Amino acid sequence: MKISKENAEHYLWGERCDGWHLVKNGALSVIHERMPADTQEVRHYHEQAQQFFFVLSGVATLEVDGEVVTIEPHQGVEVPPHVPHQMMNRSGADVEFLVVSQPTSRGDRINA
């Protein structure tokens, strides 16, 4: 079955951010997320999940273990387990990106 933002399970997070579950099972999670301008997630790490953040549109800022990385469209950054990180949108426009987690990060998040 085809999956997209239009037919995927949707959820809200943070103050104004969106997420759409494209793949959701215990072994793998793929989420399409949208962060409006000047939003950010809570700094955290995962005990088991490795993650890959891939920007589709806009410009994201990702802090990974104290290093700040700017991610432009069609660029990505891998974050291993146990590494504190925080996704931010410091730009004046929406940023849309994929978050791929293996295994799923559900219940695996520790705020840093």
Image (tube, rainbow, N blue to C red):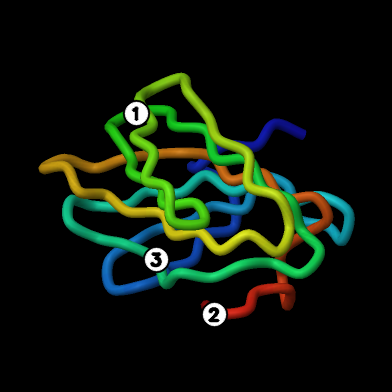
Q: Are marks 1 and 2 in contact (CB under 8 Å)?
A: no
Alpha carbon distance from label 1 to label 3: 18 Å
Local packing at callout 2 (Cα closer than 10 Å; few below 14, some 14-19, many 20+) is few
**Between marks 1 and 2 in the image, the one whose residue lies nearer the viewer:** 2
Alpha carbon distance from label 3 to label 2: 10 Å
Q: Secondary structure at mark 3?
A: loop
Q: Secondary structure at mark 1?
A: strand
Which residue appears at 54% of the width and 70% of the height?
A: 44
Which residue appears at 32% of the width and 62% of the height?
A: 40
Residue 91, position in %: x, y?
16, 42
Mark drawn on residue 41: 3
The mark total stands at 3
**Between marks 1 and 3 in the image, the one whose residue lies nearer the viewer:** 3
Q: Is residue 89 left or right of residue 20?
A: left
- Lower position in the chain sequence, tag 3 or tag 2: 3
Local packing at callout 1 (Cα closer than 10 Å; few below 14, some 14-19, many 20+) is some
For disc 2, the marked residue is 111
- Lower position in the chain sequence, tag 1 or tag 2: 1
Residue 11, position in %: x, y?
49, 66
Residue type beneath disc 1: Ser
Q: Is residue 81 left or right of residue 9?
A: right
Local packing at callout 3 (Cα closer than 10 Å; few below 14, some 14-19, many 20+) is some
Residue 61, position in %: x, y?
33, 44
Residue 5, position in %: x, y?
50, 42
Which residue appears at 80% of the width and 50% of the height?
A: 102
- Lower position in the chain sequence, tag 1 or tag 3: 3
Residue found at the far front of this picture? 66
Mark drawn on residue 32: none
For disc 1, the marked residue is 57
Q: Where is 97 relative to 67, above or below?
A: above
Alpha carbon distance from label 1 to label 2: 27 Å
